[in-house]
Image (spheres, helix red, strand yellow):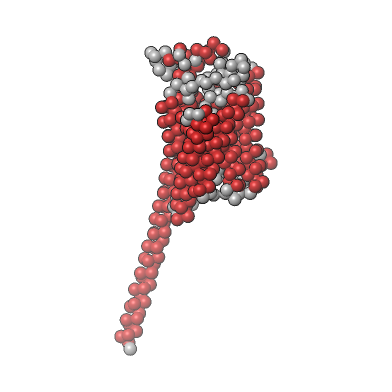
Amino acid sequence: MKKLLLTLAALAAVVCLTAPVHAQEVTADVIVADETGYAIDNLFLFIGAVLVIFMQPGFAMVESGFNSAKNAVNILFKNVMDLCIGVLLYFLFGYGIMYGDAILGGFMGWGGMGIGGIASDVAAGSLTPQCDFLFQVAFAATAATIVSGAVAGRLKFSAYLIYSAVITGLVYPISGFWQWGGGWLNGMGFHDFAGSLVVHAVGGFAGLAGAIVLGPRIGKFGADGKPKAMPGHNLPLAALGVFILWVGWYGFNPASQLAIVGADNTNAVMLIAVNTTLAAAAGGILAMLTTWFIHKKPDLTMALNGILAGLVGITANCDAVTNVEAIIIGVVAGVLVTLGVKLLDKLKIDDPVGAFPVHGMCGVWGGIAAWIFGGQPMLAQITGSVVIPLWSFVTMFILFSILKKFNALRVSPEEEIRGLDLGEHGEEAYSGFQLWTTQ
C-alpha cells in the first residue's frame, strides 16, 4: 500500500511539473497562429494595393491611346501627377477626413493629419494602419485619374493640378466618409463594396462636369451639330491599358474583402474574383454586339470600354451576387456604356475616352444592381446612387466654373490645334516623327 501511494505521488508531481509546460506550448501555438494570420492578411492587402496602383499606368495607356498623339505627353503627365499629388494630400488630409471621427454634424470626419496608431490586435483580420493607408490612397488616386480622359486635349495642365488636389484631398474623402468611414450613408445600410459609387461615379461625374464647362474640342462637332470622329492614335496601347486595368481590378475588388485568412474570407474572395471576371467579359461582348448592331461593324474601342463598364458595374455588388447575376450586371453595363456614348454625342458633350458612360453611368448602375440582385435596401441604394454622384458633379462644376471665370481653364485655340505636348510642356511623346501634325 505504501508503495502504491508513493507511485501515485510521483505521478502527481510529474503532472504538476508538465502542466505549465503544456500550457506554455498551447499559448505559443496561439501566438504563432495569430501572427501568421496577421501577416497573411496584411500581405494580402498589400498585394491588393500594389495591383490598384498598377491601374494607374493602365489608365494612362487607355487615355493616351484613345487620344491624339499631339497630346500624349500631357495625358501621361496628368496621370503621373494624380498619383503624386494624391498620395501626399490624402496622407495630409484625405485619410483623416475619410476615416476620422464625425464632425460638422456628420458631414465629414477628422482623425488628424497623417497615419496614426498601430494595429489594435496582432491577429487575423487586424490591419496595420500603414497597410490600410496604402490600399486606401490607391483608391483615391483612381478616382482622380478618371477625369483625365474626359477633359483631354483642351484643359490647361495647371488647372488639372488644382482639380486633382481638390478631389483627392477633399471631395473624394468626404463622400467616402459617408459610406466607408461609418457616416450617414453607411448608417442607412447603403452598400458599395469596392467603390462603384464612392470611387468610379465620383470620378465619372467630375469628368462630366469638366467636359460640360470646358466645351468640346475644336472640330468635334460640325456646323450641323453632328459629331465627327476623332480617332485615337494608338489602339494597341489602349488595348494593353485595358488588360492592365482588368488585372488591377483583382486588387480593387477581391482585396476589398480586407482579409483572406479563414474559410469564409477565402470563399468570399474567390466569389468576388470570379464575379469580377464574368462581368468584365459580359460587358465587353455586349458592347461589341451593340455597336455592331448600330454601326454594322464591331468597334474595338467600344468593346474595350465595355470591359471597363462591366468591371465598374460589378464593383459595388461583387460580394453579394451570384455568378449568373454578375453576368447579367455586365451585360447591362455593356449596353449602357454604348448608349451613354451616343447620348453624350446627342447632347454635344465631348468626352474623348467615354469616362462618364464607363465610370459615371455604370457606377450608378452598380449601386442600383446591389439592390436588384444583391438584396440591399432599396431606399439606401437609390439614395447613395444619387447623392454621391450629385456631390461630385456639383463641387467639380463649381471648381471648373471658377477656373473658367479667371481664364485659367482652357488652352488657347492655337495651342489646342498645335497640341498640348508642345504648347504646355515643350516636348513630344514621339520625338522626330512629328505625329502631331497629322493627328
User: From this viewpoint, which residue is outermost toward the right?
Assistant: 105
Task: Tell which of 144 and 125 is nearer to you.
Answer: 144
Q: Relative to 4, say whether 87 is above or below.
A: above
Task: Tell which of 137 and 284 is nearer to you.
Answer: 284
User: From this viewpoint, which residue is outermost toward the top?
Assistant: 414
Task: Tell which of 195 and 23 is nearer to you.
Answer: 195
Q: Is residue 183 left or right of residue 45?
A: right
Question: Residue 339: x, y in percent?
Answer: 57, 32
Question: Residue 229: x, y in percent?
Answer: 52, 21
- Residue visible at 67% across and 46% down in the picture: 379
In the rendered image, is residue 167 in sight? no
Q: Is residue 263 left or right of residue 194?
A: left
Mark count: 0
In the rendered image, is residue 407 in sight? yes
Instruction: Please state, as top left, top right, bottom left or bottom right, where the N terminus lies in the image.
Output: bottom left
Question: Residue 235: x, y in percent?
Answer: 43, 26
- Residue visible at 61% across and 25% down in the picture: 346
- Residue visible at 52% across and 32% down in the picture: 293
- Residue visible at 50% across and 37% down in the picture: 286
Question: Residue 154: x, y in percent?
Answer: 55, 18
Q: Relative to 127, say whether 338 is above or below.
A: above
Residue 395 lies in what quarter of the image?
top right
Q: Relative to 397, say whether 424 is above or below.
A: above
User: From this viewpoint, which residue is outermost toward the bottom?
Assistant: 1
